[in-house]
Amino acid sequence: MAEIPNPHDAFFRATLSKQEAAREFVIHYLPAEVVALFDLDSLQVSKDSFVDEELRAHFSDLLYQVTGKDGRPSLVYLLFEHKSRPEPLVALDLLRYQVRIWRFWLDQRRPLPLPPIVPVVFYHGRAKWLVPRDFSDLVAVPTALEAYVPRFRYALCDLSAYSDGELKGALTVRAAMLLLKHVFSDDLRDRLPEIFRLLFEIPDTASGLRALETFLRYVVQGTDRVTGDDLRTALNQTHPHRGDEIMPTVAEQWREQGLQQGLQQGHLQGLQQGIRQGLLKAIEVGLELRFGVDGLRLLPEIRKLDDVDVLETIAEGAKTLTTIDEVRRLYQPPLPGGQ
């Protein structure tokens, strides 16, 4: 498949844009006095984004609409910071996005008064969050001018402030919080068995495997702190003998998704590129699982290949061949005379 421009964004949306996961997040990670005001059965997830295009490499957002127990609408705006260090001007960004949300509300011909917005910053970086949470702290203002400065505070979900045992929610949400908390950490490989164990406990096996695919994709694309062998070992620790079965299956799914993406682009060049990217991802996973670091050393040569038939052959060979030289011969046939 084509590379996901921002794997953190993709994982964030895949997990917290589902209604039940959104409800779990609100229950467990927003202030209790705020949650007490909401009828959580009414919660709905908006598909709109309000983040500036140029900032989407660093931020993702989700908007939840929920009815208060007084019957009035409220909004919860969740801003996810992908960076490993806090953004000191995040309150200024939130002010801009709240104005956009209210304008969006009015453009839909919704009645006044405007609904309250609960801004929430979701942070999973390694550095401690020491940024002021009140917008007014960004403005140096004499007392006589304080009334003219916008005043709001954002809620903060800083995963580094939670111990692993304090992370709450249903199985998928808890597993997602664990992964997001440790994705930048050197101890990620040690946390993988617990994360996978939670996913295997999901009663609906099909849902659990779909979640597992999403988690594996994020680990592969979102961090360089674990290898394919680490993933397979963690899977086998939590579900013995399934690691060797699951990893090639996931690689095959990635390859098929590359084909589908090419078809959706609607022209031959896009089709070929989608297939090629999917095959390259399948080859990368297959080589690492089969041969470890030595197998990955073939990738610079393989990435130069454009022939999807050859890449298809390599992808299949990476799952079954026993030596690196056998793989290399799939795209570098021996010279005449054995030279």
Image (cartoon, rainbow, N blue to C red):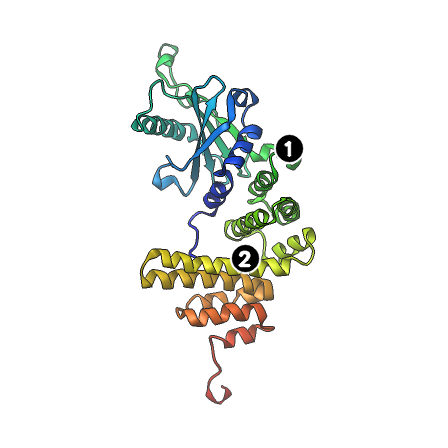
Looking at the rendered structure, which numbered label has been put on residue 250? 2
Q: Earlier in the sequence, mark 1 or mark 2?
A: 1
Where 126 sits versus 26, above or below?
Answer: below
In the rendered image, residue 174, in percent from the top left (x then y), is placed at 60, 38
Q: Residue 270, located in which quarter of the rendered image?
A: bottom left
Distance of mark 1 from mark 2, alpha carbons?
31 Å
In the picture provided, is 256 more to the left or to the right than 238?
left
Residue pictured at 57% horizontal, 22% vertical: 32
Residue pictured at 54% horizontal, 51% vertical: 213
Q: Residue 177, located in which quarter of the rendered image?
A: top right
In the rendered image, residue 255, in percent from the top left (x then y), is placed at 47, 60
Numbered circles on residues, count: 2
Determine the secondary structure under disc 2. helix
In the picture provided, is 193 more to the left or to the right than 177?
right
Q: Quadrant of the N terminus?
A: bottom left
The residue identified by callout 1 is 166
Amino acid carrying mark 2 in the image: Val
Residue pictured at 68% horizontal, 59% vertical: 241
